Amino acid sequence: MPHTTLPENAPPESAAHPRFTDHLWDVTADLRQAIDDLEFLRRLGDGTLPVESFRTYIEQDGLYLEGYAKALALLASRAPDPVDGAFWATSAATAVTVEKSLHADLLDDPRLGVAPSAPEHSPACLGYVSFLTATAATDSYAVGAAAALPCFWIYAEVGRALAASAREVLAANPDHPYARWVTTYDAEDFQTSAARAREVVDAAALAAGPEERARMTRAFVVALRYELLFWDTALHVTPWPAA
């Protein structure tokens, strides 16, 4: 998709962008291309990612889901529409139960090795969950919803390509330690949730004014930056400064 420079407060009902989330997608074209080009994602999909990097990613993703679920629960409590609130609440429950359980099963796989110590949040992980929970708690509901959207949407989009390449890996090696997990990225229920998250954010944008929509755009951009950092630092680890 070509990059189009648009004002951050472009109204969601404009002819160029009948949906506000279309505007968000356009203004982040360069950032999304940088995500698509990540070595981590390429090697995750083709099965060549070092096992220790995959374990790091799963550990950090488990920590991330705990914070993300709190942010979604905050959105559920603040949603002006009860149906939208139910969507956020269900998504929070899924993050805590279904996805965390899957991560635990993966980490029990002896092929991934044993962590030398209990994992702690990486700088990227802690920054991301802190941003999401703070935004959901202290900014408007609409801005918090925009901040939460990339975790649904970018995963769904990236997942389609990753899952296709992972299926090729599984065809050659059905016991690959993590290619099977990657194929779940394009699961129908996750794709459905991503589409629903877009609808909820579009509805929030319609009720917002220009200044609030500008803050929604900034929150979406910051969250997308954290998505890039989260994936990249699983392979190129950025340690905390020495105590």
Image (tube, rainbow, N blue to C red):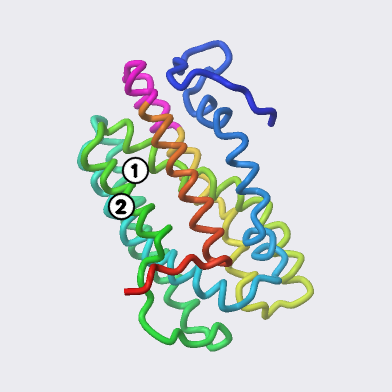
The numbered mark at residue 130 is: 2
The numbered mark at residue 87 is: 1
Left or right of residue 79, residue 11 in this image: right
User: Which quadrant of the figure has residue 54?
Assistant: bottom right
Q: CA distance from mark 2 to mark 1?
A: 22 Å
Disc 1 residue type? Phe
> Residue placed at 64% from the left, 54% from the top?
38
Q: Which residues are magenta?
A: 199-214
Up the image or down, 192 lies above or below 52; here it is above
Residue at disc 1, secondary structure: helix
Relative image position of residue 81 (x, y in whole percent): 26, 31
Relative image position of residue 177 (x, y in whole percent): 62, 78
Going from N to C along the chain, the mark reached first, 2 or 1, is 1
- Label 1: how many residues lie within 10 Å, few (<14), some (14-19) or many (20+)? some
Which residue is situated farthest in the top direction here? 15
Pick the residue in front: 169 or 44: 44
Left or right of residue 55, residue 4 in this image: right
Identify the image quadrant of the C terminus: bottom left
Q: How many marks?
A: 2
